[in-house]
Amino acid sequence: MAKEWFNDWFDENYLLIYKHRDMEDAGLQFNLILREVVPEKGWKILDLACGEGRYSYLFNNKGYNITGLDLSETLIKSGKEKFPGLKLRVCDMREISGNYDLILSLFTSFGYFEDEKEDRKVISGVYNSLNPRGLFWLDFFNSDFIKNTREKESSTRIIDGVVVKEERYIKGGRINKKIIIGSDSGKKEYFETVRMYSKNELVEMMNSNGLEVVKIFGDYTGSDWEEKSERVILVCRKVV
Ligand SMILES: C[S@@+](CC[C@H](N)C(=O)[O-])C[C@H]1O[C@@H](n2cnc3c(N)ncnc32)[C@H](O)[C@@H]1O
């Protein structure tokens, strides 16, 4: 199979650029999940596309039984070193199986595939891997917000002494980002492209895959969703 952008991008340079997406940042949404879902200690929880496992760490730390899966060998290795004892494993999100009570897809870990059918395959895998009445929590960007604020944008920043250039543009129903890290001979180039599903399209995708949307939030503090919200957070229940 041809290498896709997400096979390359999620390495140590992803960790550099998104270093502010740390445990403190994760804590906000973690608290919202605890408040809204009220998971029981015996539940089996899946952190799908977990990265290094910052959310898995928070759940595990509170005594929950959580497994983190991610495609990136680099991030899983780094997560195992940072958080010894966490259950973290390399796995493609299209290949999941199991019997979970709660599945989490956090911080825009969805919409990555070129063919929409592959995204739908992820959702049907979520359905098949949930216990009856199990819950799915999807945290995605709000495409209305992106359209209104970030049609085209470029920036140059220095993070830990490294030059980071980013160029963001909307094309083909996707938000695309070209990222250049470093300068001169040590320069590395990446590409990120995510399908801009609207809130209604996401709801339709859940419904047509046997997942009833029971709540929709617009940010990590649990505000109601509005067109100007930054996030679309869907809480879905498996219909049996
Ligand atoms: C934006 S990051 C979010 C990571 C994590 N949820 C967090 O909040 O820190 C997206 C994650 O999706 C993972 N990923 C990308 N494609 C994947 C795939 N096909 N299967 C599983 N994970 C994938 C990446 O390796 C990366 O860790």
Image (cartoon, helix red, strand yellow):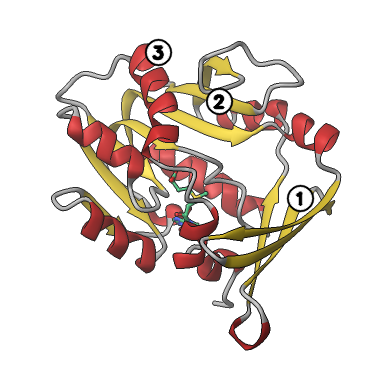
Residue beneath label 2, please?
233
Q: Residue furthest front?
A: 161
Residue 141 placed where, x, y %?
64, 35
How crowded pointer 3 is (Cα within 10 Å; few <14, some 14-19, many 20+) is rated as few
The image shows residue 17, relative to residue 45, as above or below, that is below
Ligand 1 within 8 Å of the CB at mark 3: no
How crowded pointer 1 is (Cα within 10 Å; few <14, some 14-19, many 20+) is rated as some
In this orientation, does residue 99 appear? Answer: no
Residue beneath label 3, please?
36
Give the camera-side residue of 44 and 57.
57
Ligand 1 within 8 Å of the CB at mark 2: no
Residue at image location 37% in from the left, 38% down from the top: 23
Element at badge 3?
Answer: helix
How crowded pointer 2 is (Cα within 10 Å; few <14, some 14-19, many 20+) is rated as many
- At label 2, the amino acid type is Ile
What label sits on residue 174 in the rendered view? 1
Dot 1 or dot 3, earlier in sequence: 3
Element at badge 2?
Answer: strand
User: In which quarter of the view is residue 145 placed?
Assistant: top right
